[in-house]
Amino acid sequence: MASIKDIAAKANVSTATVSYVLNGTRNVSPKTRERVLKVIEEMQYKPNTIAQSLKTKKTDTIGVIAEDVTVFNTPEIIDGIHDCAERHDLHILLVNLRLHKRIGRSFHAVDRFRDVVLSAVDELVGKQVDGMIYVGVHSRDLSGLVPPKDKPIVYTYCYADNAVSVNYDDERAAYEATQYLAGLGHRRIGVISGLIDSIPSRLRFNGFYQAVMDCGLPFDPGLIKTGDWETASGERLTRELMALPEPPTAILAMNDVMAVGVLRAAQEIGVRVPQDLSVMGFDNREFSDYLTPRLTTMEIPLHELGVQSMMALNRIIRDNGAIEEQAKPLCKLIVRDSTGPAPG
Amino acid sequence: MASIKDIAAKANVSTATVSYVLNGTRNVSPKTRERVLKVIEEMQYKPNTIAQSLKTKKTDTIGVIAEDVTVFNTPEIIDGIHDCAERHDLHILLVNLRLHKRIGRSFHAVDRFRDVVLSAVDELVGKQVDGMIYVGVHSRDLSGLVPPKDKPIVYTYCYADNAVSVNYDDERAAYEATQYLAGLGHRRIGVISGLIDSIPSRLRFNGFYQAVMDCGLPFDPGLIKTGDWETASGERLTRELMALPEPPTAILAMNDVMAVGVLRAAQEIGVRVPQDLSVMGFDNREFSDYLTPRLTTMEIPLHELGVQSMMALNRIIRDNGAIEEQAKPLCKLIVRDSTGPAPG
DNA sequence: CTGTTAGCGCGTTCAC
DNA sequence: GTGAACGCGCTAACAG
């Protein structure tokens, strides 16, 4: 690898001159400049970023701590981060906590992976990243997980006290989903919720409840069932709902995976979707478009989450604060074939 | 940020001693060692990796060039890379080419994104990575795309002349899929291939053909249809196949996305799966387990691809060559509900 | 205005 | 156990 010295020697100038040419930090006479440029070209010289960083104390690199890159939300968020990072000439050092492999889905067992997070942060701090983005796999409170370092950190798809975080508007998404169903004439809407101790479950329920009130629908607690995010629970609870004396005409599952169970149950008990029953999912997972019938669902603005996190971090790094609160990215209703007018 | 000098000063030793304590590079008397360690602890000192790298000329960082992190194969491959990298204390600098967003799926339009790749490589070389892994989104020949640098590079899910690459055994996978169907008594097996100019299409066809021969099945060219990897083509071609005077009793789609189309067509024309028709996909995409019926398919060893790439690169970096050819990772048959004994 | 010299950033490591 | 050179590029201070 050629170094700046080699260039300087070959071009008969000092290293300072080469540096000035490279960075445009000062005027250099056209002909020396040409000469230097030619040598650089010839020798395919690329400055050693490591050395630059040592001097400038900036690495133009941000650390991304992903709880698990194989979880559905993460790749698209990372894509958003890259999308934005690229425009600012920032690089990404990626740490994958492999949370699922390590502790399964006991997301709340924060203590069990605190060490992992700590060493990830140390690693990144040691590598002098300019800032960090923490990408969670499930919206939840991570306060106290990462000890306050001097490096700025932005959380997305999760949050922590006194820290900047970027999240979509869960409550509003559920509100709009419910409103959409009400608009189709449904008055008895069943809900299959996620685990009850989860933030999205609560937020989505709030949105649902608010919409029920605003649309003047009757609220029947018997139509609210608590699942566990998995297909089997969606299937089981749908059977329960449809066995009610007055079954719902629509079911809102709080994720697409449980919606698969709803669809299965409906098929097994001979309920036609969407003629007899409208079904909505949540997440707009890739497979929702491959189901029969194609699933109506709410799309989470993952890419946008990534972009906004990166933008927020960049503002903190560059302008050193001045975090004007950004509007929460919004979910988007994706209408497909699993929903239709209320029967009758 | 405390530096080694601060530690040295506070502990009343030279920076050399601190360094020796930290790295165990030389013996240090127990009591100075204790003193130094205590100061390090107190000041939460973490060595500046940048400075270390400058001196040692090793960054313990490898660059991963992903053509597109949002494509289904990539996250799991990256996870495998991390899995292995972690064990060797290697870090990952991730570049996301965002190929899909840039050039859609004209994978072969290599020229149109050469600049992007070049700047990615330069970026990584500038950051002094110890090596690189290129993660493709579609198995194909990338010879000449990346100009030979001094840095070692390993390709996975694609390949290039004179370069180390890690890929699964496509031909054998198709062979086993076909053999499995033959074992169920199917003698007329339809194939819905991917685009004909694609390597996997050819490899999978070869495997299919070989199995047909080995199992003593009749080979009927009329049962081979060329799709385009998309659902619609799977649907259309299934109609064609089932309209044949002698329709197949099983259809092997070369990816799960087209298999969705097969399932849809079957349902529409009233062919029961698997009673009347067995359907197999390829890839074991997440959604294949959510389809009705649940899809039998071949799983691609993505994680293993990542692990092996990282291992291969590590061997090159450490042992500087000695690339004993590793056995290709194998696909795995995932039997679900869409396949069954041949009718009659 | 153009070009050079030299010190610095932060650890590592060799000679004393 | 220590002093100091060194890796590579940046930049303040200085000279022509």
Image: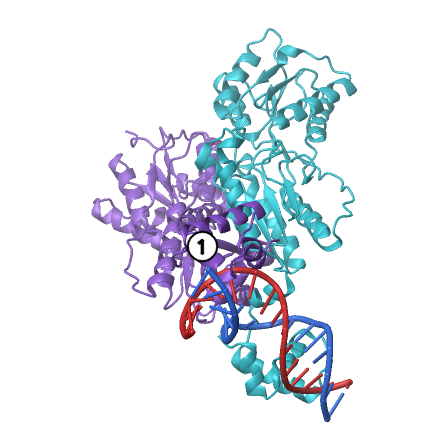
Chain colours: A cyan, B purple, C red, D blue
Q: Which residue of the protein is positioned furthest toward the top in this rendering?
A: A245
Location of residue A182 in the rendering, given as x and y in whole percent from the top left corner:
72, 22
Q: Give the answer, above or below, for where B215 lies relative to B91.
A: above
Badge 1 crowding class, 10 Å Cα cut-off, few under 14, some 14 to 19, many 20 or more, is many
- For the point 59% across and 39% down, which residue is it? A146
Location of residue B85 in the rendering, given as x and y in whole percent from the top left corner:
42, 51
Residue type at numbered disc 1: Val
- Residue B57 showing in the rendered view: no
According to the picture, the residue beneath numbered tag 1 turns out to be B21
- For the point 64% across and 79% down, which residue is it? A16
Q: Give the answer, above or below, for where A289 lies relative to A25.
A: above
Left/right of residue B165 with respect to residue B73 in the rendered view? left
Query: What is the secondary structure assignment of the residue under circle 1?
Result: helix
- Residue A117 showing in the rendered view: yes
Q: Give the answer, above or below, for where B140 lies relative to A163.
A: below
The C terminus of chain A - image quarter? top right
Nearer-the-camera pick, A40 or A216: A40
Nearer-the-camera pick, B316 or B1: B1
Location of residue A141 in the rendering, given as x and y in whole percent from the top left corner:
62, 31
Nearer-the-camera pick, A84 or C4: C4
Name the quadrant containing residue A18: bottom right
Subunit ID for the residue under disc 1: B
Location of residue A343 in the rendering, given as x and y in whole percent from the top left corner:
66, 18
Name the quadrant containing residue B195: bottom left
